[in-house]
Image: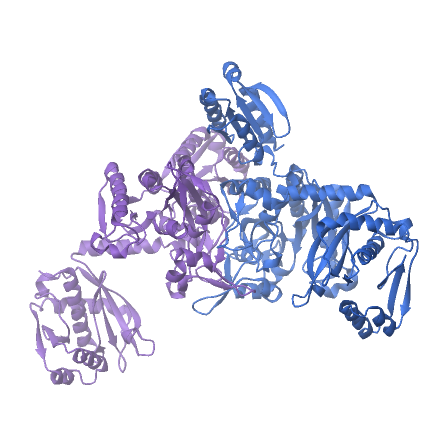
Chain colours: A blue, B purple
Amino acid sequence: MASLEEKRHTLAHLLAAAIAERYPHAKPTIGPAVDNGFYYDFDFAGGRPVKETDLPQIEEAMRDVLSSWTNMSGTEVSEKDARDRYTGNPYKLELIDGIVAAAEPITLYTAGNFTDLCRGGHSENPAHDIKPDSFVLERIAGAYWRGDESKPMLTRIYGLAFETKEELDAYRTQIEEAKKRDHKKLGKELDLFVFSELVGPGLPLFTPKGTMVRDMLDDFVQELRKPHGYQKVEIPHITKKELYETSGHWDKFKDDLFRIKTREGHEFAMKPMNCPHHTQIYARKQWSYRELPQRYSNTTACYRDEQSGELSGLSRVRAFSQDDAHVFCRMQDVKSESLKVWDVIHTFYPTFGFDLKVRLSTHDPEHMENYLGEIEVWDKAVGMLSELVDEKGVEVMDGVGEAAFYGPKLDFMAQDSLGRQWQVATIQLDMNQPERFDLTCINEEGQKERIVMIHAAIMGSIERFLSILIEHTAGNFPVWLSPVQARVIPVSDAHAEYAQSIVDGFVSQGIRAEADLANESLGKKIRAAKGEKIPYLLVVGDAEVEAKTVSVESREEKIGVMSVEDFTLRIVKEITDRS
Amino acid sequence: MASLEEKRHTLAHLLAAAIAERYPHAKPTIGPAVDNGFYYDFDFAGGRPVKETDLPQIEEAMRDVLSSWTNMSGTEVSEKDARDRYTGNPYKLELIDGIVAAAEPITLYTAGNFTDLCRGGHSENPAHDIKPDSFVLERIAGAYWRGDESKPMLTRIYGLAFETKEELDAYRTQIEEAKKRDHKKLGKELDLFVFSELVGPGLPLFTPKGTMVRDMLDDFVQELRKPHGYQKVEIPHITKKELYETSGHWDKFKDDLFRIKTREGHEFAMKPMNCPHHTQIYARKQWSYRELPQRYSNTTACYRDEQSGELSGLSRVRAFSQDDAHVFCRMQDVKSESLKVWDVIHTFYPTFGFDLKVRLSTHDPEHMENYLGEIEVWDKAVGMLSELVDEKGVEVMDGVGEAAFYGPKLDFMAQDSLGRQWQVATIQLDMNQPERFDLTCINEEGQKERIVMIHAAIMGSIERFLSILIEHTAGNFPVWLSPVQARVIPVSDAHAEYAQSIVDGFVSQGIRAEADLANESLGKKIRAAKGEKIPYLLVVGDAEVEAKTVSVESREEKIGVMSVEDFTLRIVKEITDRS
């Protein structure tokens, strides 16, 4: 039985066969399997081009041909035979040049009456292996030959392919849903952030509503950290390069840094992370073991000189806000301190309905030359993280060899409502920077003892977390996080005063409510509120004024008439519980 | 009667006379009056140098000579006579070169038996005019001839001089006090901030305590702004240079900007102010006049490429945090919106005991070519600020011609406890950026109407305000702002449990308290707490445990024994009242 990748690769051939039948002038080039399907690039020059609207017919033609492909096999041919077959197709000839230069065999694969130059890796019986309803042609795009702008522009036809129609449909639904939830689109509709041509790409500006959401997310993290003894610190966003020469970041990340030459000719950099700065706060005095751990938290921006082409909404930016924290402690405290971070992570993410998976990333004992420090120290550190994970009784993915060179770590993956996995938080042990910055405490014996650092960001990048959260919730933030929690809509002007009095009552109790007193129809106001994904709409007319009630509608359903007091109890509970 | 400046200048001569008597080899160079006194630069090469310990004797010699200086007058002399007199003194000869080159008269001034090359400006009867106890010699410093590093190093003797001994003493006391209060020294002692060699000068890092104070100051400002409808926004700290080309800052401040060339070759800059970014948040949609004013507040860092030599503690830094805000409104709202900022400023500064003075900085109607826009618009804007000031009934300094080119402003000066004046807040009207960024609203007639901006930072730079506040209070922050508000000290181990229980009670009520349970003497613990300027020390021994009381000492005095409840009421009231 063929693998899914082999089937997808076979479908690329099938597409080429269907095109060859209907567009004999089209020159086939290459057609690989890709994630979720396949594509094939053609040169349609000198004849009828293909259009999106032609795809259903081509798809049908593929299904017709498929039934006759009961066998697919390859034959090795001579260079001359291969070249003769592709006279007039410079793309295939160029591929043959490459195969010859690499001294590899030239193979042709045939199924039905269609033959293609190919390395192999197909279904041997496509008609049997591939379900006719398990694939579709998706779309057409332009693509330069070999991705090179100086080469001809080809036509790429993308197909989606899965084992079954059900899997295909599920994927297409997920894509449709993801498109509707695109955080760039929703961010604008919900008025959360904006990009400016003048400020530049990758540099989002946050509106009042977006800033409120950012701040509430960060406040939540700080609230969870507080009982664990974290203290806020503040640092400048630039530094002399000497800081990063000492930390080792200059060598490693020089090209990713925004670098600055001052008027006096000194070299500065904008910070790509906060740990080196935080070491300088720790290093201001000689600590006793009694004063440790020192736990510094600091929500602050980091900067990376990303390529324009890699920027995308809030997912990949040039300036991002990290809800960063560093714990300076003794090696013996690693387990207990990591446990605190673990607890924060395991309260934070489930609050939003994310499922978490954990990976323990450790050293490869066969290759200790890749790591800083002695294996005994590593074994001890990993031992502490393992104990922690064992105590928690969760299933943990094994990441032998996945540790950073400076220490082992726990990586956390969040699964969103569309089933997508996002790498989110890490608990990272760092034995390197304490060494490089000579960070110590005086221990019980009055001796200087090397300490370790734990990197403990919870969201990591607030911008990236916000992009994930917007798509996870489709913009339907939980009530506690919604910039406007309730909107009161009077049926007519006669009910405006009552509406405003309810809002005033809410606001005095810390509920973010507003009245919509605009001169518009009720229907239009309700649609506007739904568009803004406001959790609760309270419509008030004669009956409500009389009975001191509100007619409540949530984003999901009509809840019905209730007293102002009952509604207040309900929403305050939801806010308090962060439910 | 001579002016103070003439007396100071005369005293420089008197110093030179005393030096000439006792150090005949010393070559006099120049000796002007300066703020607070005078100095004279000598070249002591080729003989005995002068030492700090010699100053009292020289001072006495000056007083002896002074009594004989009943007349001081000048004579014009020929170049030859002047040169003959100063054969062997290359400094005076160089001065004569300069006078000759400028074609000015060469004058010699004589008093008693001492003559000096001088332009004039002295007391005519020093013995009568100058009180012998109104001056002292202060200190010795090195100074290059003409301030030029390539020229010889001279010895500068500084003197302080005032009208009377009382004024002199007052000044010396102020200086002594200011030295004790130096925020750089206190910042370290109170563990508020730290500088790192690796991060670089002008880039302070804030410790947990310093961060707490910064945040509380900023929270106070935000709390005062909130009822006025300000909304927080957030912006990146960098931008494409296009933003500043549009705003006009690129041309004006190019050299003060930290500039960045990205890996793709684009020019970016770190923001030196926030207004251009904030315009881009305003510009995200077309506003109706009904939705105005939009009031954006944003505490965020700004950056200036200052010269190393100009940096000083927190007073002058390369990265500072601005508690910035911008109001986007119609011209007709300028008065009411400025009033809101005025009220915030006049609540904020008096809370700390600062007296405020106000200057109204307006356009010069004779030179409208220096300003953007028509005089009618300016008259209207100034009219609104004047009305505001009139209503407030405060005395206002007149600043005709002191406006920025883009709008009139109100400048606020705070006087600290040492009598020093600091320029602090401004309310600044800006008609320029709305023009350059084409910011409008749709008015009642459905027409686009140009809006204006009001710049409304309260502290300006949090770092600079903190430096002023530390020196103003000598580190004795008001209780509400103190990182530790109360420290409980048990007389012995036997009282530790009681001490801790009191602290727990305080903490649960939001009072920042801690117990000092270290293995040290009571005296040492009390001295430590005083050194940290903790507002309240609560000592607890047998009597206090028995009676459920605390023995209270403030920074100023012993208050005495009181019940825990009474102390709690007292401190909570002080915190709540910010008294």
Residue B65 rendering spot, x and y as whole percentages: 13, 69
- In terms of depth relative to the viewer, which is nearer, B128 or B327? B327
Query: Residue A222, located in which quarter of the rendered image?
Result: top right
Residue furthest to the top in view is A546
**Relative to A224, is B411 on the left or the right?**
left
Residue A33 rendering spot, x and y as whole percentages: 79, 56
**Relative to B387, is B459 on the left or the right?**
right
**Relative to B456, is A530 on the left or the right?**
right
Residue B536 visible (yes or no): no
Residue at (82% x, 50% y) in the render: A61
Residue A132 visible (yes or no): yes
- In terms of depth relative to the viewer, which is nearer, A369 or B233? B233
Residue B274 rendering spot, x and y as whole percentages: 43, 51
**Rendered-image quadrant of the C terminus of chain A:** top right
Residue at (13% x, 85% y) in the render: B80
Query: Residue A188, located in which quarter of the rendered image?
Result: top right
Q: Is residue B60 above or below residue A113?
A: below
Residue A143 rendering spot, x and y as whole percentages: 69, 60
Residue at (66% x, 54% y) in the render: A429
- In terms of depth relative to the viewer, which is nearer, A408 or A202? A202
Q: Is residue B554 above or below residue A46?
A: above
Q: Is residue A149 above or below residue B105?
A: above
Q: Is residue A47 above or below residue B417?
A: below
